[in-house]
Image (cartoon, rainbow, N blue to C red):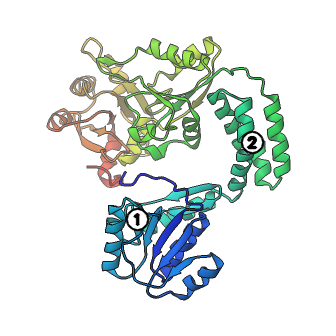
Amino acid sequence: MDYFPVFFKLKGQDCLVVGGGDIAARKIELLSRAGANITVVAREIGEAVATMQTSLGLTVRQTSFTPENLERYKLIVSATDDAETNRLVAHTAQEQRIPVNVVDNPGLSSFIFPAIVDRSPLVIAVSSGGVAPVLARLLRAKIESAVPPAYGRLAVLAEKFRDMVKQRIAITPQRRVFWENAFQGNIAEQVFAGNEQDAELLLKQSLDDFDGTVNNGEVYLIGAGPGAADLLTFRALRLLQQADVVVYDHLVSAEIIDLARRDAEKIYAGKQRQCHTLSQVSINQLLADLAKAGKRVARLKGGDPFIFGRGGEEMETLMAQGIHFQVVPGITAASGCASYAGIPLTHRDHAQSCVFVTGHLKDDCVNLNWTQLALPNQTVIIYMGLIGLEQICLSLMAHGCPGDMPIALIQQGTTDNQKVITGTLATLPALVAEQVIKAPTIIIIGTVVSLHDKLKWFKGEH
């Protein structure tokens, strides 16, 4: 990130605005909303700033900017149309280590003004780092519509009860759960409906009912999808962001893991070929132990937990030990990667069924029902088949599948690193051998692959 987001506490602090035009007036209005004591220096004072002088109690000095006596200012804004003045303000402020913003000039600024959604005391700031301010404003508009003003009242309610809740519930994880329930349940609904008194009564009742017992934790078996973060379901995102611990495998992208709470513990439990961080039995028990310790555990699995994700085994362990859990389906790699490659898994003219198999090597062999897989009018999807690709192609041809049967290998489908290599059973192994392939990959076999060139739409493909 080019800028580190922070919020300045400016109430009662001295701030300087250089410039007296309409742009300066907009910055003055923002600073005044934060309670700053504002001094304006400008040779010419516009009508808007002149009006603010009385209404906001501004100190106005109708003179040119000089670099003397700036020590008392906590923040400086330069909003003039004179490039030389802007440079002088910026260099002087930076020499004295005072945060400075030169409007519409990020190169001279040590901080920038974000687009602001004001639900005081809740404030949301959106910034493009000065690169695309119009885009930041458009995003602010979307947030404005999604976050009604009542959220500010909800924050006021939380502030009113914050110390009381902290004294009553001393353990931080329990306190966090208490507030999450308050913000997502009937208490919040009463605030949104304008019934603050009822909301207070409900909050007091919830606090009185708290008995101090440590609730057992919970496990969320979440399908993280094929790679792209925006393919997560709403439920997956909500549970991920409230989890205390995230246990993830190597197929889960960094972008998805970054959606978790910043303070959540992250545990890598990936299993790659000939490199298992934890055995499956150890993972099963880890999930149970964390839940027994009162943790809410997000178990992130690439694709869908129940399609070659061994989610069933983890569920069996949790059920056997009485651990509460939820399962959140995810877009499996077959569906996600095929869709982004423009390869329909079924098609009236090509395939009336799909077969999902895993291509894991065992004793250097891929042991599958080749007779079934070689049948016509179907699509065969092979997970984890990159290493055994040549053997897969030869076995299918040996069991009656024609050598010109279309086949595709998709690398890191749905992401910007997606690559689709198409060929036939006879030619694809040699084509793949000529390229550098990065896992994860999936293989699709069937005449539906012939539609790729016509239907490919995803521009992230290399």
Against 387, residue 231 (above or below) is: below
Residue 351 image position (x, y, % from top left): 41, 39
Q: Is residue 137 left or right of residue 326?
A: left
Residue 456 image position (x, y, % from top left): 34, 52
What kind of residue is marked 1?
A: Val
Q: Nearer the viewer, residue 157 or 398?
A: 157
Q: Nearer the viewer, residue 337 or 315?
A: 315
Residue found at x 54% / y 40%: 237
Instruction: Choose top left, top right, bottom left or bottom right for residue 163.
Output: top right
Q: Which residue is mark 2?
A: 161
Crowdedness near tag 1: few (<14), some (14–19) or many (≥20) residues, C-alpha within 10 Å: many
Residue 352 in view here? no
Against 18, residue 316 (above or below) is: above
Against 327, residue 38 (above or below) is: below
Q: Secondary structure at mark 2?
A: helix
Instruction: Choose top left, top right, bottom left or bottom right for residue 78.
Output: bottom left
Q: Which residue is mark 1?
A: 100
Q: Is residue 74 left or right of residue 181?
A: left
